Image (cartoon, rainbow, N blue to C red):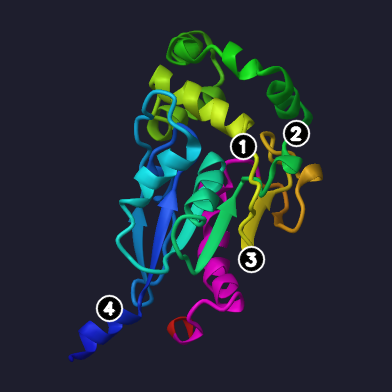
Amino acid sequence: MDSTAINAQNKTAIYFMPGMAANSLIFEKLRFDPHFFECYYLEWLEPNKNESLKDYCKRLAEAIQHKNPVLIGVSFGGIIVQEIAKLIKVQQVVIISSVKDPSEFPWRMKLARKYKLYHLFPTRYINFIERISKKIVSSKKIVHRIDMYQKYLTVRSNNYLKWAFKNTIEWTNDHPVSNIIHIHGSKDHIFPVNRIKDAIILKNATHILILLQAKWINENLPELLKKNGLHENNLD
């Protein structure tokens, strides 16, 4: 067997799962050493009618073609990779700007869960509000932010959004996955840091740290994986 084949066998497969409504472009700033890692990107599927979170994750897992991969998920994608890790054997789960169980939800999400308020979320108006806002605002910062939303948040069917909100709010995680690497921002406005436990906290980082703190992730995540026992010979 030649050295190229040996190197390919020794590489670690990483599968990335984007956040709610996002596409895999949110990972475009990540750069992992290709000598040691092979990166693959999962995309959201359109949910079937009344599809459970478990059944949805089974369908997503069909796209994972490697044994014992690393799964990295952002926000709701972090919940998804935890559920996939209950279905297949994985080396490591990494969640970014996400939660490990419902106890880390903010109070407003717990309220929505108790009273099933996710049914009231106006998913069909998201695109309309975004277009109108861009026309009437004068702030370049806000316009730039809307441009980012339009680039990265492209999964917007009413069916998908309703399913995603419902399954986020109703997530129970009765059988937690152990040994999770959790990276979180100190200024995350979706999942406030005061409820987050056992995480690596990045100072002043927000919910979109996957874009704004990509350099930190590129420099530190391989070492974090090594410390958690991920094929140390591959990462030396």
Q: Could you say where residue 51 lies in the image, as x and y percent from the top left?
A: 43, 30
Q: Which residue is mark 3?
A: 179
Front residue (pair 86, 214): 86
Whether residue 211 appears in magenta in the rendering, the answer is: yes
Q: Which residue is mark 4?
A: 8
Relative to 94, is 4 above or below? below
Cα separation between marks 3 and 2: 23 Å
Of the image marks 4 and 1, the number of the one nearer the N terminus: 4
Question: Mark 4: which amino acid?
Answer: Ala
Tell me the magenta residue range.
Answer: 206-233
Q: In the image as oriented, which residue stretches furthest toward the left? A: 1
Front label number (1 vs 2): 1
Relative to 151, is 117 above or below? above
Seen at 58% across and 68% down, the residue is: 220
Seen at 74% across and 39% down, the residue is: 192
Q: In the image as oriented, which residue stretches furthest toward the right? A: 194
Q: Which residue is mark 2?
A: 106
Give residue 153's quadrant in the image. top left
Q: Give me the disc on residue 171.
A: 1
Q: Could you say where residue 151 lies in the image, as x and y percent from the top left?
A: 38, 32
Front label number (4 vs 1): 1
